[in-house]
Each structure stands twice: as C-alpha cells, then as structure tokens.
Amino acid sequence: MSKNKLTHIAGTFLIQAEGAFLNGAGLDTGEDRNAVIPKTFLDYDKNGRGIRVPYVSAQAWRRWLRMTFQEENPNEPGTELKALDKSAKGTTNKIGTEMNPVEFAEDDIFGYMRAAKGQGKETEIPETLTEDEMLELAEREDENKETKTKPKTEKTKAVMRPSPFGSSILKSIRKAATISDDEGFVHLKEGSPLPYKTKFYNTQLQAIFGLNYSRLGVFRNDGDRIELDENFVKQYAADGTIRETETGIYEITDNKRRERATMILKALAVLRGGAKQAQFGTDVTPKAIVVAGLNCGNLIFNDLFEEKESQPVIKLDALKDIINDYRNRLTTHVFIGIRKGYLHPTNETDLQSFAQEKSDIVRLSSPIEAVNQLTAELEKVG
C-alpha cells in the first residue's frame, strides 16, 4: 500500500435484481400501450447480436442512496429539493437544496447548482444600497470623474458544487434475454376486467462509484463559479466554523471529512429503494462490494463482474491486474464483501484462496463488514 495521503475512495457493487422492476421508462409503444416497461439500453450478446438489457439510472439509485442516508443518520439535518424561482406563467423553473455544505452533509457529498441570471457578465455593484453606502458611492463617483476611472464592477456568480460522490448507472451483467411479462387484470364489480402488463427483469446489476475524499468539507470559490455562497463565507468565517487555507479555498475547521465519508459509505452498504416494491419487493442491498482508498481519482474497479452458468462471478484475473497496477496508489487494503452463497461456488472458493494468498493487501468479509473495515481504516490513513 502507498504511504501517500488518501484522496479518493473507489468501489463497485452488485445488486441481486431477480424478478425486479427498479426504474421505469413509462408505457410501451405500439400496440402494447397497456404495458409498463423498465429502462433498458442496447447491448450485445456473446454472438454479437443486439439485445436490450435493463439498467437503473444513476439519478434513480443516487436518490435511493440519499433517502437511505437520511434514514440511517436521523440526527443529521436533511436537505430537500425546493423551488427557487418561477416563470412568468407561475411554473417552477429553478430548483435546489439548501446549498449549505457546512451545515448539511448531503449538500457537501452530493453537490448542487444555482445558476444565476447573467452569469459571467459584469455589473456595477452594489445594486441595493443603504443610505451610508449611497453617500460613499457618490463620493467614489466624484473621484472616478476626476481620475477618469470606471465604476467598480463584479461578475455575476453562480453557486455550483460538483458532487464529490460520482456514480455510474446500474447495468445488467447478463448478456441474454432478461425481460419477462407479468400479465394482470383489474377486476371490476361490473363490466369486463381491465388487462395490464408489467415488463420485469431477472439479472444482477452492477455499478461503480467514487468519492473524492479530499473535497469533503472543502469549498473553492474561484472566478464566476463559487461552491460556497459568499453570505455563508462571511457568516462562517466570522464565527470560526470555516477557515481560508488558500486564496479562495475554505475548509470546515472541525474536520468533517472522515465522518461524512463514513456516513455515506455505510448508507451504501444498506442501500434500499426502487420502483414497484409493493409488486416486486426487491432487496437492493449490495450482495457484493469491492472498495478501497487511493491517492488518485481513477475508478479502478470497473466491470469486475460477469455471469458463469447463470450465476455471478468476480473476475479474479482482472482484480489481480488492478491490484498489481495500482499497488503504489492504494492507500488502504482492498476490501471485498460477498454474501455467502451468492457467487458461483467455484468462484467463491477461488476468491477465498486469493484473499488468503494476498492477505497483506486484501480483506474478505461480508458487504457490510467490508465497509465497516474500510471506514475503520480511514482513522489510520487520514
């Protein structure tokens, strides 16, 4: 393992989505207008034939994660989307959260954006003045006329925080037909039953994720895009909640980095959510997870799962290559969590042997325990 400072956490996980409908795409087209369909994308089977396979959008499962985060951390103030502006017709045209990453861990982790009208354009400041400020501005204008200088201006700034938590879609590892039809009828007291159909799938869904650990609790205000509203800067700098570490870079004084990373990773380990749970009741808790700390931002655990004889397997050769290639960039052990009996039996045995052989760098346990072990190791590596 590298002795360099941990800056990122990268991982991948697998969800057992057998008999599931987790993210809908609306009604089917053509003659099947009474069928509700899941989201799918075009992939190719082992023979190179095009086939549509299911996926869950990153937006959807990130929403599950936010809700799980709130439920698992009831003492942490939650933040919800709300209307920020309305159009001339009275409809909402801008939404946002509290956009306060100092007080709200969710805003810190998931980011936010509040676009400003005239962003990047220069305007005279200030637009609203007190009486004293008006007198001061009048004096400055007189000075400007004498020195032939232009009035002071500033650029309109947008408040934007790119999310430190990055994620892919949840996509099927099964490269074969996975979509089935669930035929149903609504029976009426009078008249003929009304038919309906739900298309569901039978597969395992994998995703990758990354957490920019170094950005948690750190906010950059640079140019016409700022991460921390300047009103918050003034407020929290005055009471000592944040400090300026470099020009335009602010950090929470009471370091929240390890605490917030622990909260989001532990929420991921018990992830819950998904569409049509009343009808299909799918457990979306990860059944397999691989996660580690790094001193770089590469999402290294990509495409680590596949199917063998209709059961999931972890690609051990690929995992070995990743560990060898990134050994000097790994700042923690590689934690692998697998629900017993989930992987193909031969693959599970091979994985256990590999973990014993590489016990200096690999730790094998259950999914929840793997995350617990990683978060405990964060105490040691910073």
Image (tube, rainbow, N blue to C red):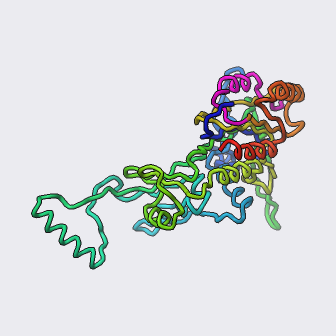
Taking the image as drawn, is residue 91 in sight? no
- Find the magenta span and give its range: 309-332
**Placement of the C terminus among the 4 image quadrants:** top right
Residue at screen point 26% across, 62% down: 124
- Image quarter of residue 75: bottom right
Q: Is residue 313 magenta?
A: yes
Taking the image as drawn, is residue 303 in sight? yes
- Locate residue 148, reporting x and y percent: 11, 59
Q: Residue furthest left?
A: 146
* 34 sits to left or right of 312: left
Residue at screen point 83% across, 67% down: 189
* 53 sits to left or right of 336: left
Mark count: 0
- Locate residue 92, reporting x and y percent: 48, 64
Give 284 or 167, whichever is nearer the viewer. 167
Residue 321, compared with residue 381, is above or below; it is above
- Locate residue 201, reporting x and y percent: 76, 41
* 264 sits to left or right of 192: left
- Locate residue 72, reporting x and y percent: 74, 59
Residue at screen point 22% across, 76% down: 135
Q: Is residue 101 magenta?
A: no
Residue 239, compared with residue 9, is above or below; it is below
